[in-house]
Image: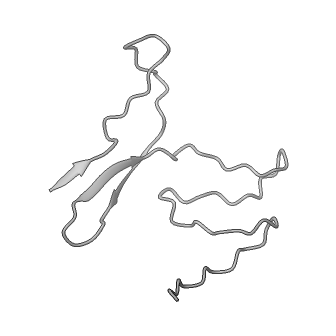
Amino acid sequence: MTSSSNLNYVRYTDTPGVADPDQPSTTPGSEDPGDGWETKEYNNYNGDYIRHGDTPGDDSVPQPSPNGGDYVRYSDTPGVRAPDPEPYERN
């Protein structure tokens, strides 16, 4: 059995009860949290998201994948990838 999270989302205009004709684009997704938990279906609303760099007109900024699977941590220095996190060790 699956349950939905945001599948019924509707963007409205400033007029109460009037749905905005320009709804955000979506892609379907699902998340399987593991044994004993329900799979969650959801709508990913990043369909029309465009990542912009700090420099206006810079089109070299990499765009995200539709389901967000290409996340890369970066350091505070532009273009320098952050080191992989160290495993937590309890002392």
Residue 20 point in image, percent of width and height: 46, 21
| The N terminus: image quadrant | bottom left
Q: Residue furthest top?
A: 15
Q: Residue furthest left?
A: 1
Which residue is depicted at the point 32% across and 41% down? 7
Q: Is residue 3 left or right of residue 73?
A: left
Q: Residue furthest front?
A: 91
In the rendered image of this protein, does residue 89 appear above or below residue 79?
Answer: below
In the rendered image of this protein, does residue 1 appear above or below residue 13?
Answer: below
Residue 21 point in image, percent of width and height: 46, 22
Q: Is residue 30 left or right of residue 62?
A: left
Residue 87 point in image, percent of width and height: 54, 85
Q: Where is residue 62, by image quadrant?
A: bottom right
Q: Where is residue 79, by image quadrant?
A: bottom right
Of residues 3 and 45, the one drawn nearer to the viewer in this rendering: 3
Q: Where is residue 48, by image quadrant?
A: top right
Q: How many marks?
A: 0
Residue 43 point in image, percent of width and height: 38, 46
Which residue is depicted at the point 82% across and 67% down? 77
Colour scheme used in the picture?
one colour
Which residue is depicted at the point 34% across and 49% down? 42
In the rendered image of this protein, does residue 70 appear above or below residue 22?
Answer: below
